[in-house]
Image (cartoon, grey):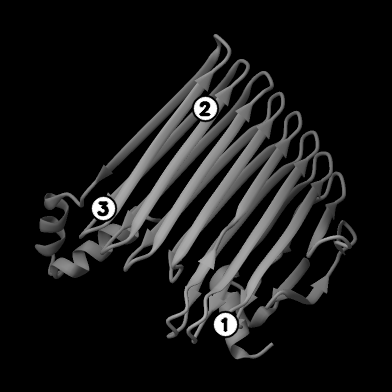
Amino acid sequence: MDNKDKELLQEITGIQNAEFTGAYNIRKDGKGIERKITENVNIITKKDVSGIDIYVKENTKYEFIHIPVIITESGLNDVVYNDFYIGENANVTIIAGCGIHNNHHKDSQHDGIHRFFLEKGARVKYIEKHYGEGEGTGKRILNPVTEVYLKNDATMEMDSVQIKGVDSTVRVTKGVLEENSNFIVSEKILTHGNQFAKTAFEVELNGENTSTKVTSRSVATENSKQEFSSKVIGNSKCFGHVECDAIIKDNAKIIAIPEIIANNVEANLIHEAAIGKIAGEQLIKLMTLGLTEKEAEEAIINGFLK
């Protein structure tokens, strides 16, 4: 890896100089380039399609697993299929995401299809960050698909961030929950220029006492466009809460499409959506402290997306 590779990895993982600890698999320009396994985490290359299978032993506690992807080749269309098998009562943090550096005129694209299978009592914290950069006219395109299957008493927390440089993205997240399981999703998106971002959530609450909470915070500026849709299906005694909160500026457009379906009298489902501009009193307050209007707007947006 060269310095640019390491800089991209740092942007999406927070790790300096690619000095990862624990299990990891690094993918660059469509190929795996580095890998490490541990006593409790095994990573195996798929034979039928491009991708890996990650196996976490039961009762594994507090291990970190990094599976970052970087793309520096303009014109590349990379598709990867990764499956995660999390053993009973395991508790791990998985850090993924993709960074694209494109300095040329051809589009660069990464489609990551991730499936998570959590056994009884398992717990996963999944962190995914998407980032794009480069001076070329070619687009930086990211289309992540995440499927989550939770058995009894399992918990999945998903933290997804897209803050800079991605020209087009379609993000699909699906969940199927069994008894007493819990799926928590937090999403943050910032678009500008002519960028486009679409998010689609669909969660089936099948078992008794299942729950899901989805929180989406987004900012659309200039001529960018965003779409947010969510579908929560309550098939039992369950709880679901979806919150979409967005700030719109300039000539941007935002569409929010909620859908909640109760197939059981004890399904408690809530959807909240709010789209609006930055409040004038917020700007005035910060400007009285010495900030320019632009600096005040940036401070409000940064705080909103924290």
Q: Position of residue 137 (x, y in %)?
A: 42, 81
Mark 2: which amino acid? Gly
Residue designated by label 2: 240
Mark 3: which amino acid? Ile
Task: Nearest to the eye among marks 1 and 2: give it.
Answer: 1
Asked whether 101 or 182 is in front, the reply is 101
Above or below: residue 285 compared with residue 229: below
Above or below: residue 210 compared with residue 224: above
Q: Earlier in the sequence, mark 1 or mark 2?
A: 1
Q: Earlier in the sequence, mark 3 or mark 1?
A: 1
Q: Which residue is the extreme one toward the top?
A: 265
Q: Is residue 9 visible?
A: yes
Residue designated by label 3: 248
Q: Which residue is the extreme one toward the bottom?
A: 2
Q: Which mark is residue 74?
A: 1
* Image quadrant in which you'd find residue 265: top right
Q: Position of residue 75 (x, y in %)?
A: 58, 79
Q: Residue at x 53, y 40 (%)?
A: 201
